[in-house]
Amino acid sequence: MRFQVPQFIEVEDKIFGQLTLKQFIYLAGGGGLSFLIYTIVGNIFIAAIPILIVMAVVIALSFFKVNNRPFINTVEAAFKYWVGGKLFIWKKEDKPKPQTSQAALREARNFAGVMVPKISDSKLKELSWSLDIKEKP
């Protein structure tokens, strides 16, 4: 049995002429809100400023894309960031360095009574080289 796999699932269907359903709803809602502002204010010159702001937001929601994603996703992410709590995982704290004495240094070298040998710089480079080329020192 063969099934047809849908293609272009990321493209929304154009329902109202060249507009998708979401775009039509945004534009119709913006037009309705603009008409409501005009009827409440009564004067077209005073109502023009809020109507222009509403229509600018509506046009941005309908047609503007940020990083090939709808503008409403950016608005939602900005709102969640502004309202939500911020979690900072790491904060650098300046700690004063403790003063070490000679006795403390000797005790650190004699860890648990075992004398740790000091390796010279040339011997350390030789060991590093032998480990890099995977041979026994």
Image: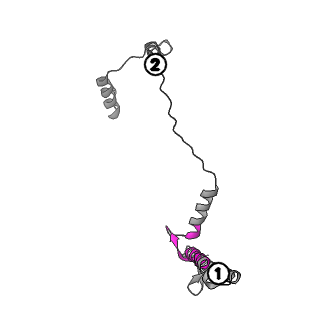
Q: In which quarter of the view is residue 26 placed?
A: bottom right
Please name the residue that numbered disc 2 is placed on: 100
User: Dot 2: few (<14), some (14–19), or many (≥20) neighbours within 10 Å?
Assistant: few
Q: Residue at x 51, y 30 (%)?
A: 95
Residues 136 and 70: in front is 70
Dot in front, 2 or 1: 1
Dot 2 lies on which element? Answer: loop
Report whether 87 appears left or right of 132: right
State the quadrant of the N terminus.
bottom right
Residue 94 is situated, as x and y percent measured from the top left of the image, at 50, 33
Residues 17 and 12: in front is 17
Residue 78 is situated, as x and y percent measured from the top left of the image, at 58, 61
Q: Is residue 63 visible?
A: yes
Look at label 2 and name its amino acid. Thr
Q: Is residue 134 magenta?
A: no
Residues 126 and 51: in front is 51
Report whether 98 appears left or right of 42: left
Which is nearer the N-term, disc 2 or disc 1? Answer: 1
State the quadrant of the C terminus.
top left
Report whether 135 appears left or right of 116: left
Q: Residue at x 45, y 15 (%)?
A: 101
Reply above or below: 54 against 98: below
Specify start and end residues of the magenta stretch as a single range.
50-73
Residue 70 is situated, as x and y percent measured from the top left of the image, at 55, 70
Distance of label 2 from label 1 (alpha carbons) = 74 Å
Q: Is residue 67 magenta?
A: yes
Look at label 1 and name its amino acid. Ser
Reply above or below: 3 against 117: below
Please name the residue that numbered disc 1 is placed on: 34
Reply above or below: 122 against 45: above
